Amino acid sequence: MMKLRVMASAASVAGAIMLLAGVGSAHGDDPLTRPIAPESAKRWLGPQVPTRIYGNSYLVGFADLNVALIRTSAGLVLIDAGVPQGVAAVEANIRRLGFRVKDVKYILSTEPHFDHAGGLAALARDSGATVVASVAAAAALRRGTIGPDDPQFGLVVDFPGVTRVRAVADGEKLTLGNTVITAIATPGHTAGSMSWTWRSCERRKCLNMVFGSSLNPASADDYRYTDPAHAFVIAGFRRSFAVMRKLPCDILFSAHPSQSGGDEKFTALRKRPVPNPFIDRGACRTVATKFETLLNARIAKEGVR
């Protein structure tokens, strides 16, 4: 049985800072962990103590870049990987919880952008895990670059390609030991964006967990959502907003915690874990409404140009 440690010490945060600064890399000058957009990425990479949030579900990422860990009876599952320069810190966080990186069997991807997928190749190599993504995202992950169907094409930089990717369809279930994880297509931010749902249980109380892909209508400066050629992107967003509103959703992890108030919930949990501030059955509806409002405002703004 794997030894569990619910929370890491303050010393581990100091260690994470050293790892993010490039100290203690296990691979030296590693092409899979070379920093991408380091100045821009700084705003996401505040060190965060690895913490159990509920049941078998943990966060092992950063202050504004979530990486989730699910403990099953047959190994570990990660969701997202962060940027390449953060991989050493993620792996250190896994170990601080008493787990082994080699016990990671799957790494689920929410989108093929460098801030969430840049570390996939290194984490997959170090763990031996299989990366899992939507069909559209899998192609981009293998290439290490997005295509012209992405609203941020020309803006988002390339990242290390992933050699072994399993593509799954919307609604497909992935089973590992006693845990079933369901892929939920949530396109818009990228054509291949995928959210993931599972159940976590604590003292016989089971909750619906959601790791939501970004719903942010960000784009390159010259991109117009109102271009008829981009109607499929708006349709994807509309579908995703509707899906998120209907999902059974007791705890939401958003790809960037600040997009859903997850950063504030994490701070509150560290101060007072009971009642658990992450339990919010309206979180998925709230985040859908937030980004639908932003998309509508963007469309209206384009319409008056």
Image (tube, rainbow, N blue to C red):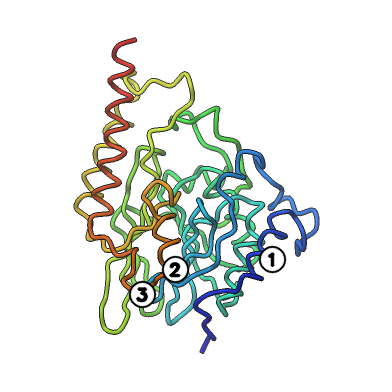
Q: Nearer the viewer, residue 136 or 91?
A: 91
**Residue 80, placed above or below residue 186:** below
Q: Name the mark on residue 271.
A: 2
The front one of 246 and 10 is 10
Specify the farthest residue to the front: 271
Q: Which residue is mark 1?
A: 15
Secondary structure state at the residue bearing disc 1: helix
Residue 184 lies, in percent from the top left, at 31, 54
Instruction: Provide the secondary structure element on which disc 3 rests.
Output: strand
Tags 1 and 3 in contact by the CB under 8 Å rule? Answer: no
Q: CA distance from mark 3 to mark 2?
A: 29 Å
Taking 53 as reference, is 39 left or right?
right
Q: Give, as a three-letter code, the residue at label 3.
A: Thr
Q: Quadrant of the C terminus?
A: top left
Which comes sooner in the sequence, label 2 or label 1?
Answer: 1
Does 83 sit left or right of 220 as displayed? right
The answer to whether marks 3 and 2 mark residues whose Cβ atoms lie closer than 8 Å is no
- Are discs 2 and 1 less than 8 Å apart at CB? no
Q: Which residue is mark 3?
A: 179
> Which numbered disc, 2 or 1, marks the residue closer to the eye?
2
Give the residue displayed 68% in from the left and 59% down from the top.
17
